[in-house]
Image (spheres, helix red, strand yellow):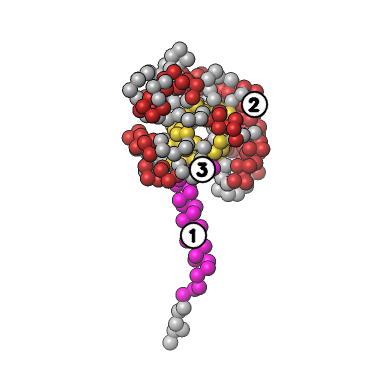
Amino acid sequence: MQTLRERISANGYALNGYCQMPSPAAAEIYCRQGWDVVTLDLEHGAMGFDAAVRMLEVMAAAPVLPFIRIPGFDPRLIAPLLDAGVMGVTCAMVNTADEARALVRACRYPPHGVRSMSRMSRASLIYGPDYVSRANQTVTVFAMVESPEGLANVREIAAVEGLDGIYMGPVDLAMAVVGRVPPLGGRDPEIDAVVDDAMTQVVAACNQTGTIAGINAPNPEEALRMLNRGFRFITLSSDVRALAAQSRAWVDGLRKLAPAPHRPASA
C-alpha cells in the first residue's frame, strides 16, 4: 500500500473523508467512493475501540489508507489501534513541540519511539511479515493545531522530527480567538481574518519544514481554494454529513417539485 506522502507525490494532494458512525456497513460503502484516506473519527464520532477494529476489517478490502483521529494524546489508545492496522494518526489539540514529540514517539518503534512491538498483530498479518521493519516509515502522524497556543508554536511543532503533518482546526481556533461559533455556510469578517492569518502561518511552517498541511473544506470549490493556498491533505466530508446533506437535498427537492395537495373548499 502507498504511503500518504507517495499518494500526494503522485496526485499533488490527498482527499480524506471521516467515518463517524460506528458501522462496518457504512464504512465499507464510504471507503469505495474514491477517497485516498478514510479516517475513523474517535474525537467527534460515536465509535470506540471495538467498533473501530470491526470497521478496519471491512476497510482492508478498499484502496484507502485507514487513519484515526483521537481527541487527545493517549498512548493506550494509539498503540492498539496501530496494531489493529491503522496507517495514520491525527491527534487533536497539540499545543507545543514537546506534545508533538510525545505523539511521534508513541507512533514509532525504538529507537525512534516507544511503541511496543508485537509480531502477531493484525497489522503484521495484513501488511506482511516485514511490517515492523517498515512501520516507522509508513505510519503517518498529524498534529492538529487548533488553539492560540498551538498556532503560536506552529513553527516549532512542524519542525519536530518524525512528524508528517500539521492539521489545522479552523473552527476550534476561531472559537478560541473570537469567542463565538463560526457561521455555517456564511461569512463573519472577524473570524475570516483570524482563519486566513492562521492558514498563512500553518502553510508557511509546513513549507519551511517539509511537512504536510491539512485542513477541512466544506465543498469542492473551497477545497480547490485550500489547495491553491498550499494545503495538500483535504477533508471534504464525513459519512454523517454526506448522509444528512444528500437525504435532505432529495427530500427538499421533491417537496419543491411536487404539487400542493388539493384541499376542498370549506362549505
- Residue at coordinates 43% horizontally, 87% vertically from top-left? 267
| Residue 77 visible in rendering | no
Circle 3 packing at 10 Å, graded few (<14), some (14-19), many (20+), is some
Magenta stretch: dominant secondary structure: helix
Q: Secondary structure at mark 2?
A: helix
Splitting the image into 4 quarters, where does residue 131 fall?
Answer: top left
Considering depth in this image, is 46 or 220 the residue closer to the camera? Answer: 220
Q: In the rendering, which numbered label is found on residue 207?
A: 2
Q: Nearer the viewer, residue 216 or 32?
A: 32
| Rendering coords of residue 222 (x, y %) | 61, 44
Q: Which residue is rendered at x = 51% and y = 30% of the image?
A: 2
- How far apart marks 1 and 2 lie (CA) works out to 42 Å
Helix, strand or loop at mark 1: helix
Residue 130 is at least partly visible in this image:
yes
Residue placed under numbered mark 3 in the picture: 34
Q: Nearer the viewer, residue 9 or 228?
A: 9
Q: Residue at x 39, y 22 (%)?
A: 129
Q: Amino acid at mark 3?
A: Gly
- Tell me the magenta residue range: 235-261
Q: Is residue 242 magenta?
A: yes
**Label 1, on which residue?**
250
Looking at the image, tell me whether mark 1 or mark 3 is earlier in sequence order: 3
Quarter of the view holding residue 152 = top right
Q: Tell me which numbered mark, 2 or 3, is placed earlier along the sequence.
A: 3
- Kind of residue at badge 2: Asn
The answer to which of marks 1 and 2 sits earlier in the sequence is 2
